[in-house]
Structures are given as C-alpha cells and as structure tokens.
Image: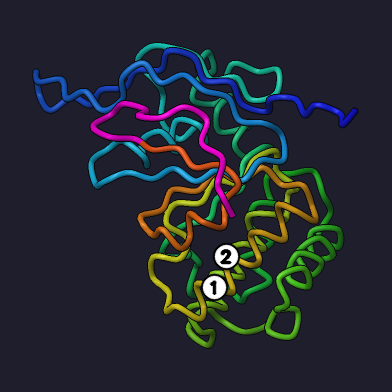
Amino acid sequence: MAEQKQNIVEIRHLYKSYHRGSLAVPVLFDITFDIVAGEFLALMGPSGSGKTTLLNLLAGIDKADEGSIRVGDLDITTFSETELAHWRANHVGFIFQFYNLIPVLKAIENVELPLHLTSLSKRERREHAEMALRMVGLDHRMDHYPQELSGGEQQRVAIARAIVTDPTILVADEPTGDLDRVSAEEILAMMERLNTEMGKTIIMVTHDPRAAQRAKILRHLDKGYLTDDDSQNPL
C-alpha cells in the first residue's frame, strides 16, 4: 500500500475583507481546503476572484479576518507581523510575474538575498546561491546583471532565489504572465521538475489554462468563493 502523504497546508473557514474608509469590501468567503505535501496546485479564476489575496494569506504577506491557516504544525494566523516576517524568510519561496530582481545586483547577488536573513557565512551563502543557479541552468550567467538577461533567464534567477533557502512552500503569482510562449514553457517545465524531482510544494496563481495544466490539482475561485471540490488535473 502506498504511503499516504500528509497535509502541509490546512485552511479552515477563511474570510478576508479590505477597507476603503468606513466601507468593508469582502474578498474571500469561508475558504476551506488542504494542500498535500509535495503537491503542485493551480488556483484559477477571473480577475477579482480573490486568487492573489488567497496566495498572499498562504504566504504570510497578509492576514485573514477570520479562520486559520496551518503550515506544517504552525497556525500562521496567530503570528505577529515580526513572527510572520521570520516565518516567511524560513519557509516561503516567492516567484513573481515581474521577477522583482534588483537591477544593480548581479544574478548571484540577487539569489543570495534571502540568505542574508540566515546564519550562513558569506562563503556558505555563495555556495548555496551557486547551487541554486546550477539547478535552474544559469550558473554560467551568475555574474550578469538583470538587464543583461532575457525575460526567461530573469525568471529562472527569480526561481533560484525562491528555492535557495529550501523553503517549505513555493508560491508563484502569474509566473509566466510576462513571458513569451517558449520562455513560459521552459519556466513551467522547470517548476514541474522542482515538484516531481525535488518534491517541492508549489501553489500557483494563473490566468493561463496552459500553465494550469502543468499542475496536479486545479482549484477555482469565483467572487471570493471556492467553487469546486478537489479537482484532479487530467494531465
């Protein structure tokens, strides 16, 4: 009998609103679901459905109004802002649509950035960053600045930066949204390898059905509601 994987994320009765003056604007309503360790989950839905808000809550960037989010054995909804910042640094890797690389830093220096929040020595930080760049096939470009790299290469640097701390979860917000089709396919194939070969848990927001098809599980949000049960990707 195959070993049953454990949940790495458990979300229960999550609500979130934003405030514009005295007006509360509801964004998420009673969201409840689990994410299994080693899963590759795609969140889809129209603009304004709450996808990015949910991703930000899972990543500890924002805080819920009600409900709980357990990652591992920790309920991050109980954390202070300082505790959340420390938790993010140790447990979350971020992949953004527009890369968010620092232009004045070389590729390897961008990858090293999250490691400055750790106790690693300068030599250890460099070794970890070099390894991460090798994993994304860019060790030969480590001394180049972002403007010297293509869009696909910049996103690969961003992925190396996301995985360099060996995070518990990777969160990706439209990771192929600024790329041409060929570069997008390369990035998605790389994310698949991170999931299948390294066992990384990936939570991806996307509008692109082709990107979503790379995930193992699809979930849909509409107007702040989860509109389906566990949906196995047919591919």
Residue pointed to by mark 2 = 188
Q: Residue at x 41, y 33 (%)?
A: 54
Q: Amino acid at mark 1?
A: Glu
Instruction: Determine whether label 2 and label 1 are within 8 Å by CB.
Output: yes
The picture quadrant where one finds residue 220 is top left
**Residue 88 x, y percent position in the rendering:** 59, 36
Q: Is residue 117 left or right of residue 122?
A: left
Q: How many marks?
A: 2
Is 168 displayed left or right of 227 in the figure? Answer: right
Q: Residues within 10 Å of mark 1 (few under 14, many from 20)?
A: some
**Chief SS of the magenta region:** loop
Badge 1 is on which residue?
A: 185
Does the magenta portion include 60?
A: no
Residue found at the far left of this picture: 22
Q: Please identify the quadrant where the N terminus is shown.
A: top right
Instruction: Give residue 169's position: percent from left, percent from top.
Output: 64, 40
Residue 131 placement (x, y as % from top left): 81, 66
The residue segment tinted magenta is: 221-235
Please say whether residue 232 is one of the residues in the magenta stretch.
yes
Q: Secondary structure at mark 1?
A: helix
